[in-house]
Image: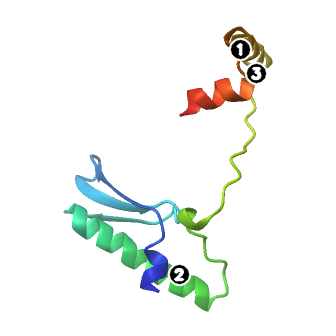
Amino acid sequence: MTKEIDRYTYRVTWSEEDQEYVGLCAEFPSLSWLVETQEKALAGIRKLVKDCIKDMSASGEDIPVPLATKSYSGKFMVRIPPETHRMLAIQAAESGVSLNRLVSSRLY
């Protein structure tokens, strides 16, 4: 089980509101762990994820797939206002690049 929880996406950040560090896991957005040090926040959220996976397994629930192990196609759809689409198409044409290349260069 330890190997599986190592593949999840963890983050530790300071919570000004709570005056403590908070451990988070992207794949389990409803979970968090508040504590006085960064190290304890990471250890706490990892244990919480491990316990949560154990409970989910016991009840037959689907366990989230770690983001690091998913495959991505490199494609996603974004809806924008028609005026923005037109403006970007003009900029791409004037730059001599495809609309896709123009937009992807701005995302990076």
The residue lying at 67 percent from left, 12 percent from top is: 95
**Residue position marked by numbered label 3 in the rendering:** 81
Q: Residues within 10 Å of mark 3 (few under 14, many from 20)?
A: few
What type is the residue that disc 3 sits on?
A: Pro
Which quadrant would residue 34 be assigned to in this image? bottom left
* Residue 58 drawn at (x, y percent): 60, 91
**Residue position marked by numbered label 1 in the rendering:** 96
What type is the residue that disc 2 sits on?
A: Ile
Q: Residues within 10 Å of mark 2 (few under 14, many from 20)?
A: many
Mark earlier in primary sequence (2, 1): 2
In the rendered image, the vertical position of residue 64 relative to residue 105, given as above or below: below
**Residue position marked by numbered label 2 in the rendering:** 53
* Disc number lying in front (1 or 3): 1
In the rendered image, the vertical position of residue 91 relative to residue 78, given as above or below: above
Total of numbered circles in the picture? Answer: 3
Mark earlier in primary sequence (3, 2): 2
* Disc number lying in front (2 or 1): 1
User: Marks 1 and 3, Cα distance to the nearest angstrom?
Assistant: 23 Å
* Residue 92 drawn at (x, y percent): 71, 16
Mark earlier in primary sequence (1, 3): 3
What type is the residue that disc 1 sits on?
A: Gly
Q: Secondary structure at mark 1?
A: loop
Residue lying at the far left of the rendered structure: 36
User: Marks 3 and 2, Cα distance to the nearest angstrom?
Assistant: 41 Å
Task: Find residue 26 and name its label.
Answer: none
Q: Are marks 3 and 2 in contact (CB under 8 Å)?
A: no
In this figure, which colouring scheme has been used for the structure? rainbow
